[in-house]
Image (tube, helix red, strand yellow):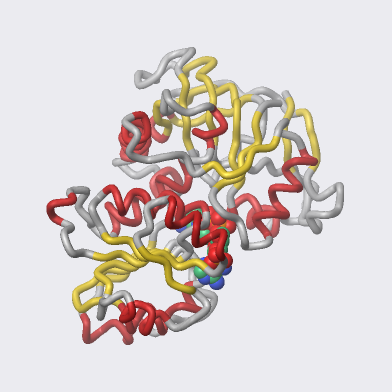
Amino acid sequence: MKAVGFYRNLPVDDPNSIVDVEIDKPAPRERNLLVRVKAVSVNPVDVKTRARKADDGKLAIPGWDVSGIVEETGPDCHLFKAGDEVYYAGSVSVQGADSEFHVVDERIAGKKPASLSHAEAAAMPLTSITAWEGMFDRMKIIRDPDLNIGKTILIIGGAGGVGSIATQLAHEAGLRVIATTSRPESTEWALAHGATYTIDRTKDFKNQINDIGLKYVDYIFCLNSLDEHWDSIAKVIAPLGRICAIIGPKGPIDMGALWDKSVVFSWEFMSTRPNYNTPDLIFQHEILNDLADLIDNGRIKTTLNSTMSPINASNMRKAHKQIESGTTIGKIVLEGF
Ligand SMILES: NC(=O)c1ccc[n+]([C@@H]2O[C@H](COP(=O)([O-])OP(=O)(O)OC[C@H]3O[C@@H](n4cnc5c(N)ncnc54)[C@H](OP(=O)(O)O)[C@@H]3O)[C@@H](O)[C@H]2O)c1
């Protein structure tokens, strides 16, 4: 079957940085689904995986955002059957899905939103699981607008892939959403995807939050450059507030800065459940099914911003180059082989 991958880390403009390959079609075992891949989205993790690739001559296949059709089920599957449309992120600890077929544990796949095309659906899983787990699981935000009256969340990186769904989910939960942006086009996008206000991420946050009429924010969801924003974060988080970050620090972080406000800090990594095969692995199936209902009920929209076809090395290099620029707004999807 056709696939797209890389053997070593080369600059993205090098035609050998990402190549078209032929690999064996996998077989579904136990609770695995064999999925015919219709569309994949490209995330910073694809770029980081390429950047970390050892020069060992081995092929790596990225791709951790899929929309497709179940071709065959493993003997222990009972959530899906052949012909069902599914969408999923999978696990970054196993081979990605930039291939005509891919296997995934059914407990981390969800029913594809019926109202979305495969390209629109492929934009959603990885970022939505991250945003959902970060806000509703880690920070314990309750998805009930009556319980969130007057509560505010600051989302750092508001127009990126994760930001574009986090702003919508937070708005849907009844929070007042402040998103950071730095450009007119990302500001416009964030305001169209659930943000109530935007602030400039290149300036100190405190004065900008005060200008909105607030002293503090109750929650901070940091999706970008934790070290760079740490001082601002520590200043604007409310006493007893909660912070979640999805990117590791580049150096030591001064946790003591949060001490006298009794702030809770948490990490979110969307592959923790599949990587460690946690007993509640099926939570990601439930997240994706709940999200599909929100989308099909018109409460959440796809974060797809650009589509390329077909899924091949040439288009994948263009997508990696865009992600590497750090300026991506919404999601990039590749469709069809
Ligand atoms: N832990 C997890 O499970 C998990 C899951 C998904 C992603 N991630 C990681 O989270 C990060 C964000 O992912 P993503 O998919 O949202 O990325 P993305 O789509 O590439 O984010 C691009 C956006 O980031 C904003 N940005 C750029 N530099 C920034 C800075 N210094 N501070 C704040 N915002 C900045 C830009 O908007 P403006 O220039 O307008 O501000 C741009 O729109 C990546 O490092 C990714 O690897 C982690």
Q: Position of residue 336 (x, y in %)?
A: 67, 26
Seen in the picture, residue 206 relative to 190 is either above or below; the reply is: below
Residue drawn at x 42%, y 39% is 301
Furthest residue in direction right, as rendered? 15
Residue drawn at x 40%, y 26% is 111
* The quarter of the displayed image where residue 293 is located: top left
Q: Position of residue 196 (x, y in %)?
A: 34, 60
| Mark count | 0
Residue drawn at x 62%, y 61% is 327
Evaluate whether residue 202 shows in this view: yes
Q: Position of residue 294 (x, y in %)?
A: 32, 35
Residue drawn at x 48%, y 63% is 157
Q: Is residue 336 left or right of residue 121?
A: right
Q: Is residue 45 left or right of residue 164?
A: right
Nearest the eye: 277 or 150: 150
Evaluate whether residue 95 shows in this view: no
Quadrant (top left/top right/bottom left/bottom right) for the N terminus = top right
* The quarter of the displayed image where residue 232 is located: bottom left
Q: Is residue 146 left or right of residue 61?
A: left
Nearest the eye: 127 or 329: 329
Q: Position of residue 206 (x, y in %)?
A: 36, 83
Nearest the eye: 56 or 20: 20
Quadrant (top left/top right/bottom left/bottom right) for the C terminus = top right
Furthest residue in direction left, as rendered? 146
